[in-house]
């Protein structure tokens, strides 16, 4: 639900809703990864533990970024320099932290994919989607280092919305397939 809420908030332009939804995604992601880990076999426990650690790092980074957006950025009169650093929309440090957080999310999905015993067609899709999602980690780390995102970038907001909507369209099936996976495991 949080992924769909995030997609909707991006479309209607609700920053507040987008940030809250992102926090709920993070709060749900760690239990999801831990649930996968609880079903992992002995020989894949290292993958499970790695995924849990990466999920925890993702959550901390995301919570710092979006909590700052909902508190300091939204409620305080920030200097121009502080705003450039803290305001997600300035493509500054906190935007880079956000991407770093999503790199850890992608790494968590990559590693947890190795724990899934794909016995059904939907399990095979889930495993593939989680594995492929791991590839996003590379771009999430490299693009900020290359300075691709800038505050004065033409069409930056639209590009950001389109990329995030693509991510939602990609990740929503992961959530649905995960639900089906866990339901079968019970």
Image (spheres, rainbow, N blue to C red):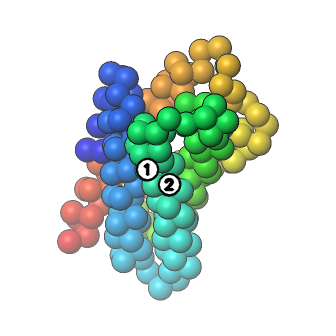
The secondary element bearing badge 2 is classed as helix
* Residue 173 at least partly seen: no
Q: Quadrant of the C terminus?
A: bottom left
Instruction: Give the image location of residue 166, x and y in percent.
Output: 47, 31
**Residue contact at pointers 2 and 1, CB within 8 angstroms:** yes
- In-front residue for pair 154/113: 154
| Label 2: few (<14), some (14–19) or many (≥20) C-alpha neighbours in 10 Å | some
Q: Residue at x 34, y 43 (%)?
A: 21
Q: Residue at x 43, y 29 (%)?
A: 165
Q: Residue at x 40, y 64 (%)?
A: 30
Label 2 belongs to which residue? Answer: 64
- In-front residue for pair 102/65: 65
Q: How many marks?
A: 2
Left or right of 80? Residue 133 is: left
Residue found at the very far bottom of the displayed protein: 42
Instruction: Give the image location of residue 49, x and y in percent.
Output: 51, 77
* Residue 77 at least partly seen: yes
Left or right of 98? Residue 142 is: right
Q: Image quarter for residue 139?
A: top right
Label 1 belongs to which residue? Answer: 67
For the residues labelled 2 and 1, the Cα–Cα distance comes to 5 Å
């Amino acid at each position: 639900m949080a992924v769909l809420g995030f997609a909707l908030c991006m479309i209607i332009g609700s920053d507040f809703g987008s940030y809250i939804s992102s926090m709920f995604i993070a709060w749900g992601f760690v239990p999801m990864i831990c649930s996968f880990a609880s079903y992992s076999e002995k020989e894949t426990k290292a993958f499970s533990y790695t995924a849990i650690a990466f999920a925890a790092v993702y959550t901390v980074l995301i919570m710092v970024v979006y909590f700052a957006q909902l508190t300091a950025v939204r409620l305080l009169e920030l200097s121009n320099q502080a705003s450039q650093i803290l305001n997600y929309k300035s493509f500054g440090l906190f935007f880079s932290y956000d991407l770093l957080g999503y790199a850890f999310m992608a790494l968590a999905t990559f590693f947890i994919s190795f724990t899934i015993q794909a016995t059904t067609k939907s399990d095979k899709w889930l495993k593939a989607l989680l594995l492929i999602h791991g590839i996003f980690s590379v771009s999430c780390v490299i693009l900020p280092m290359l300075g691709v995102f800038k505050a004065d970038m033409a069409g930056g907001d639209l590009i950001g919305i389109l990329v995030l909507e693509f991510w939602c369209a990609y990740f929503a099936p992961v959530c649905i397939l995960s639900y089906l996976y866990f339901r079968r495991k019970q």
